[in-house]
Amino acid sequence: MSCQPTRTPPAERVDIPGLRERYRHERDKRLMREATDQYVRTTGADAERDHFDQTYESDPHTPVEPRDPISEDVDVVILGGGWSGILAGHHLRAAGVEDVRNIDHAGDFGGVWYWNRYPGLQCDNDAYCYLPLLEETGFLPSRKFADGLEIREYAQSVARRAGLYDGALFHTLVESLRWDGSIRRWRIGTDRGDDIRARFVVMANGLLNIPKLPGIPGIEGFRGKMFHTSRWDYEYTGGSQRVPVLDRLADRRVALVGTGATAVQAVPFLGRHAGRLYVIQRTPSTVDERHNPPTDPEWVRTLRPGWQKERQRNFHHAAMEMLAPGEPDLICDIWTEISRNLAAELDAEGWPELAPGEFARRREVVDYRVMERLRERVASIVEDPETAEALKPYYRYLCKRPASNDDYYPTFNRPGVQLVDVSATRGVERMTEKGFVASGVEYEIDCMIFASGYEVSSDLDRRWGIDVIEGREGVSLYDHWSDGFQTLHGMTTRGFPNLFFTGFIQSALNASTTEQMNRHGFHAAHIIGQALLRGAEEVEPSREAQDAWVRQVRETAVDVWQFQAECTPSYFNGEGSEKRRFYAGEPYGPGWEAFEQLLEDWRARGDLEGLVLSGADVRPSSGEAVAPS
Ligand code: NDP
């Protein structure tokens, strides 16, 4: 059956002006002058470590083995072993580049899926889009929202298939990257004392790599157990990722800080097993029903070559742009509801031409109706009216990452579970030896679990956790970009030869983050493959090409700040700080498909336009492109 629009309250029943006012009030209640500085550092020299060890030395999953420092020359170092690092490696290998080394502080490949093993962990969006290379590997996840364990095992199988294990260096933290002009290589310093000299470096260090810890006064005095959800301690809770029966919590009082996507997945398990559970909430999530069917063999039989790309495009249209007339919603979940409902309305009207302002107004009405539906959903499940009211989200859809879970709201009907609303005090007031204080009341607990998220929108050095990145003449990358990013295609920057970025800087955004990483990895692999083929020792953008790209990005940028500024604070909007405008990475305005086409045309021309290649023996452009799979 094709995907139908959802039933939402009619526009006449939704008091939009009143809600707009309420949304503003809820945002103002949470805005903090400190913005991202409300969190303490968990990496770097001044990191908070004593009671919150995020180093790999405390890796609960793989024993850390001592090893001697390495001194070596290598063609390519990929910084990271998560999806972006695996995909970059896959494409490099396919481009014929053999000498590749992934370095990661984790004990294996997997990135966030390595570290995160908390109970309930699943992919929150369509795994048929999220999991890369499904057609190439022939793998299909067992259900729409795949389990974390299945994703980790798949990620590791892709790394194995690409032959990346041989070169991988795990439990190794990169501390410095320095361009050494005398040998035309990057010198990579690690906390293991290594001196690795790489011709090329691909930064595949991800987005959710550094957990953040709220700077709660008194945290150092708490005598109980504490951990972040990305370092789940099954020794303490009982159970395992495979069998998450947290039997050691039966007589324990547990508090969980945060109600974002992670908490929504973990809370049902904690509620089921903990003697007492306090869920500490500053801002509620939107939580819809899950509907997570197993992969249908009938559907699988209908798949034709190119299906994943088509599905990802459809997801991107529905989640980040708009479904086209007649375009079905293949994804049919929380991410695509607004587009789907709006498309149904416009379809009924014969798709009238709408000016951008009118289109935005129509979309906004659908947004308010969907959010009203979600608030009504809370009230229909949660029995205690005060708790239900506190769990209702009052902000525009996509101000926060939407969640879906069938067991989250019912958990609050359990006798041992209590929601502690700390919105009025902008977070937990303080911690004591025995527990935490909220609204003047001390709650005694045995364990505090932080589902408090990651350094996504903090300053780049903090977000990346690498103290030194120095290009030519010892210039720091952080200084180089202090007045704004400067790149060609978001992937290279002048003065930092042979260094490639993947991710969110001056590039377009795709609804499937992994597909975005995939195309960046492909493009970096193409350039590196070409440079090696042509005997180039250095590759970097020309000043003109870089300036032109920066101009193009800025001139075409879609200003999403107005929408973001009205949102409740979160990492989406740099905790409500204006700085977000810069740290958002300046996405390329014409959108993902235009960006993909631009790179494809650029590669097809074969002249590496805008890049300067130098070295003792650079052969002119042959025009032929190395064609990774
Ligand atoms: P988030 O950053 O989304 O949430 C952090 C939570 O901690 C928020 O509820 C925040 O409240 C709360 N918090 C922070 N400081 C305090 C404080 N001082 N007192 C009380 N509460 C506090 O982190 P998550 O780990 O939930 O999710 C991060 C991202 O990870 C997601 O957006 C998603 O991209 C990814 N993810 C993906 C999943 C998947 O697809 N499988 C599953 C889980 C996560 P407030 O909102 O008020 O700031």
Image: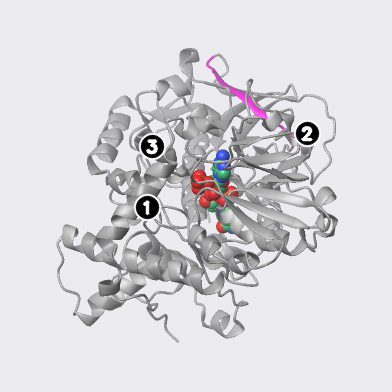
- Determine which of the numbered discs, if any, sits on residue 356 in the image: none
Choose top left, top right, bottom left or bottom right for residue 609. Answer: top left
Asked if the residue under mark 3 is in contact with the one under mark 1, i.e. CB atoms within 8 Å, the reply is no
Of residues 231 and 56, the one drawn nearer to the viewer in this rendering: 231
Rendering coords of residue 175 (x, y %)? 64, 24
Amino acid identity at mark 3:
Arg
Q: Secondary structure at mark 1?
A: helix
Q: Which residue is mark 3?
A: 580
Asked if the residue under mark 2 is in contact with the one under mark 3, i.e. CB atoms within 8 Å, the reply is no
Rendering coords of residue 335 (x, y %)? 44, 64
Rendering coords of residue 410 (x, y %)? 62, 69
Mark 1 and mark 2 lie on one chain; the one further toward the N terminus is 2
Amino acid identity at mark 1:
Glu
Q: Which residue is mark 2?
A: 57
Rendering coords of residue 529 (x, y %)? 51, 41
Magenta span: 171-181
Mark 3 and mark 2 lie on one chain; the one further toward the N terminus is 2
Per the picture, the main secondary structure of the magenta-coloured stretch is: strand
Amino acid identity at mark 2:
Glu
Callout 1 environment at 10 Å: few (<14), some (14 to 19), or many (20+)? some
Q: Residue at x 51, y 60 (%)?
A: 391
